[in-house]
């Protein structure tokens, strides 16, 4: 175990409790209970295929009709019929999003003001000046595709506008979450991740988000465990249909475009999920939504194919799975997505952040663990170094907690884009909002080849 790993394990004893830092991890094709994802050649053939599948007695468990995506629970003989159906473009075992858990701290903090603990917001708002320049209103909405939200939280309740949705089906992932009812109104956050992300966008109380008067909606795709990629894809489509202006995806998957081999069996040439993500993002853009995604927390140069291959091979080795093809960081690597990596308090790339020339579009403060490595766990907590490099935001219990990850960098970009759309009347003009962000919402004094267009400057974005 690495030194950092030992320190993080020790922290579970030192602190009150831990949280998820970035819902991000390896995703692989797995035949879990014979679940399959189907991508149709043409979404207009959805009804025809649906009726044909029903007539064969195939169990259809999840659909995203707008882009021609279905999830089936099938026997081997049934899936053979599916793969040979004239309407089907891709069919493969369903891909799930695997949480990447890391230890962080959470504690109830003194009230009423937490501004002195928000080093990240101080930096990109120029110590709060952006709030006085423009803080938004609820005519513009950010859709948070995540683990849900705590609607009653003091700092969030006034910004949560009607229309949030639960996309986790009854029974949850592979039917293993009995508390999941499938009720569309079941948006309560069980992990804390979605509530933390929401606070960084629009908290307006004891702490401040980047856009404290903007509207937010929650699209819940994580229950207490992992999420299925099809739920995330459906959430993108639903948010776009709901006229959400910015869609925040603090999550991701490593997907293989090519062939995978498990116990001598070969998968199809390309995962249905990759095409489905591409279609969903194009669908969202067409309806006027900007899509923002976090870059991942594995310290990977995403443009280094050998490094990516080695990383995935090591992860797949324990399941005796091999592959031939190219690994993609999805949805961050897809065209049309604003991809966000993370910086720490020094302004340097965070030690955990994925990066890559032509992959990263913009960076924002997401915290770090460099002080933890430098001082050790005990001093990190007792001497306050934790507060100097971790990111504070809202917690499900009505309090606040610290975390770090690209997951907490992307919400600041999403919130800034919402302010741009609102102030400059770019509703349903996603590319104009993005161009404005890259032209004015960048700290011109900081340059790094791995930062894409540069580091976020919210004051600059709303001052032009």
Image (tube, rainbow, N blue to C red):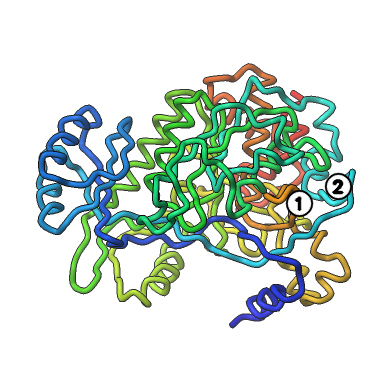
219 to 73, vertically: above or below: above
- Name the residue: 61% across, 66% down: 102
Write down the residue under mark 2: 114
338 vs 278, left or right, is right
Rendering coords of residue 52 (x, y %) = 12, 37
The numbered mark at residue 117 is none
Q: Residue at x 25, y 61 (%)?
A: 259
| Residue 11 vertical placement versus 115 (above, below) | below
Count residues near mark 2 (Cα–Cα under 10 Å), then give few for <14, some for 14-19, many for 20+.
Answer: some
x 89%, y 47%: residue: 111
Q: Are marks 1 and 2 in contact (CB under 8 Å)?
A: yes
Is label 1 or label 2 in front? 1
Asked whether 169 or 91 is in front, the reply is 169
Q: Which residue is mark 1?
A: 400
Residue at the (66%, 77%) spot, across then down = 9
**Residue 313 percent across, percent down from the top left:** 38, 71
């Amino acid at each position: 175990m690495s030194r950092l790993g030992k320190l993080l394990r020790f922290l579970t004893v030192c602190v009150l409790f831990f949280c998820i830092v970035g819902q991000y991890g390896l995703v692989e094709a797995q035949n879990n209970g014979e679940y399959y994802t189907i991508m149709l050649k043409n979404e207009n053939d959805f009804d025809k295929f649906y009726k044909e599948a029903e007539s064969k007695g195939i169990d259809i468990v999840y659909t995203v009709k707008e882009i021609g995506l279905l999830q089936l629970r099938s026997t081997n003989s049934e899936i053979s019929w599916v793969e040979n159906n004239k309407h089907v473009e891709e069919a493969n075992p369903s891909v799930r999003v695997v949480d990447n858990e890391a230890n962080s701290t959470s504690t109830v903090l003194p009230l009423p003001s937490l501004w002195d603990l928000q080093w990240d917001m101080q930096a990109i708002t120029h110590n709060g000046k952006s709030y006085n320049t423009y803080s938004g209103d609820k005519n513009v909405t950010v859709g948070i595709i995540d683990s849900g939200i705590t609607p009653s939280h003091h700092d969030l309740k006034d910004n949560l506008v009607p229309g949030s949705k639960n996309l986790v089906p009854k029974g949850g992932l592979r039917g293993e979450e009995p508390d999941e009812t499938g009720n569309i109104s079941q948006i309560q956050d069980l992990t804390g991740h979605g509530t933390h992300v929401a606070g960084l966008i629009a908290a307006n109380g004891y702490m401040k988000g980047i856009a404290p008067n903007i509207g937010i909606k929650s699209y819940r795709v994580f229950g207490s465990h992992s999420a299925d990629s099809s739920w995330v894809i459906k959430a993108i489509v639903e948010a776009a249909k709901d006229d959400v202006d910015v869609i925040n995806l603090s999550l991701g998957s490593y997907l293989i475009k090519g062939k995978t081999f498990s116990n001598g069996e070969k998968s199809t040439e390309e995962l249905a999920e990759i095409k489905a993500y591409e279609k969903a993002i194009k669908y969202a853009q067409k309806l006027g939504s900007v899509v923002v995604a976090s870059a991942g927390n594995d310290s990977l140069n995403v443009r280094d194919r050998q490094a990516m291959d080695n990383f995935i091979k090591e992860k797949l080795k324990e399941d005796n799975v091999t592959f031939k093809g190219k690994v993609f960081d999805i949805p961050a690597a897809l065209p049309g997505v604003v991809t966000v990596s993370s910086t720490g308090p020094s302004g340097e790339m965070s030690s955990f952040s994925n990066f890559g020339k032509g992959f990263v579009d913009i960076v924002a403060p997401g915290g770090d663990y460099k002080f933890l490595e430098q001082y050790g766990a005990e001093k990190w907590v007792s001497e306050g170094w934790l507060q100097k490099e971790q990111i504070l935001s809202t917690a499900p219990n009505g309090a606040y907690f610290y975390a770090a990850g690209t997951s907490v960098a992307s919400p600041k970009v999403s919130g800034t884009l919402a302010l741009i759309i609102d102030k400059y009347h770019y509703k349903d003009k996603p590319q104009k909002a993005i161009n404005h962000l890259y032209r004015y919402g960048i700290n011109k004094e900081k340059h790094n080849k791995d930062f894409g267009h540069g580091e976020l400057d919210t004051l600059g974005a709303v001052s032009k």
